[in-house]
Image (cartoon, rainbow, N blue to C red):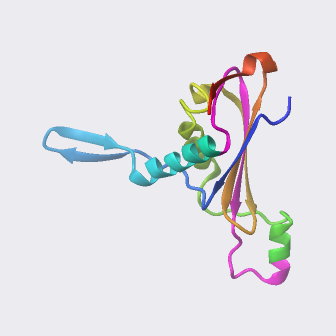
Amino acid sequence: MGVHACVTVPGKARGKQRPRAVRTKAGVRVYTPEETINAEGWVRACWLDQIGRVWLTGPLRVEIDVVVAPPKSLSKARLSLALANDLRPTTKPDADNVAKLALDALNGVAWADDVQVVELEVRKLFGSEPEMVLRVIPLSEPDEMALFLGA
């Protein structure tokens, strides 16, 4: 079917943080950390800026590339391996938390719910600039896959 949408989210990728709980006089209050709210908002803003309003329906495949800047401590030999993807980052954020943040950010913007994502691939790579690249590929027929809502 090909790539339907490809969005680049510049900056360091963030993972979805766990909800926090605080004890109050009225009981326990659970909230989402502000960093997670801001990161989801940034992903959403990048989608709307680069793709616009499109409502994807049916089953979807999502591919996420998390590009991390190589550490300055790498030797020239290891740096060339890193940039050729022969050396991969094993640092935070966790791939599953990045995927959760990205998918949750696009709920109600690109699709109704991330339950539509039936295939998911997340890769962490080294690159010159930190960014996250999201590719959304519909797995259904083109006439069934999207409802365009206008720009």
The correct choice, above or below, for 35 with respect to 128 in the image is: above
User: Looking at the image, is 84 positioned above or below residue 136?
Assistant: below
Q: Which residue ends up furthest to the top in the rendered image? A: 144
Please state the horizontal and vertical placement of residue 150, each as a whole percent of the image: 63, 28
> Which of these two is toward me, 50 or 24?
50
Tell me residue 130's x, y (percent): 67, 63
Name which quarter of the figure residue 149 lies in. top right
Q: In the rendered structure, does residue 36 fall within the stretch colored magenta?
A: no
Q: Indicate yes or no whether the magenta region holds residue 53.
A: yes
Q: Which residue is found at the position 46% from the left and 51% from the top?
A: 38
Q: Which residue lies furthest to the front in this view?
A: 151
Q: In this view, does 42 lie to the left or right of 67?
A: left
The quarter of the picture where the N terminus appears is: top right
Q: Nearer the viewer, residue 117 or 111?
A: 111
Percent of width and height locating residue 59:
71, 23
Q: Residue at x 80, y 66 (%)?
A: 87
**Does 76 sit above or below residue 127?**
below
Give x and y (percent) for residue 137. Answer: 77, 33
Place residue 124 in its image quadrant. Answer: bottom right
Residue at the (56%, 33%) spot, across then down: 109
Point out the stretch of residues depicted in magenta.
Answer: 50-78
Compared with 11, 2 (above or below) is above
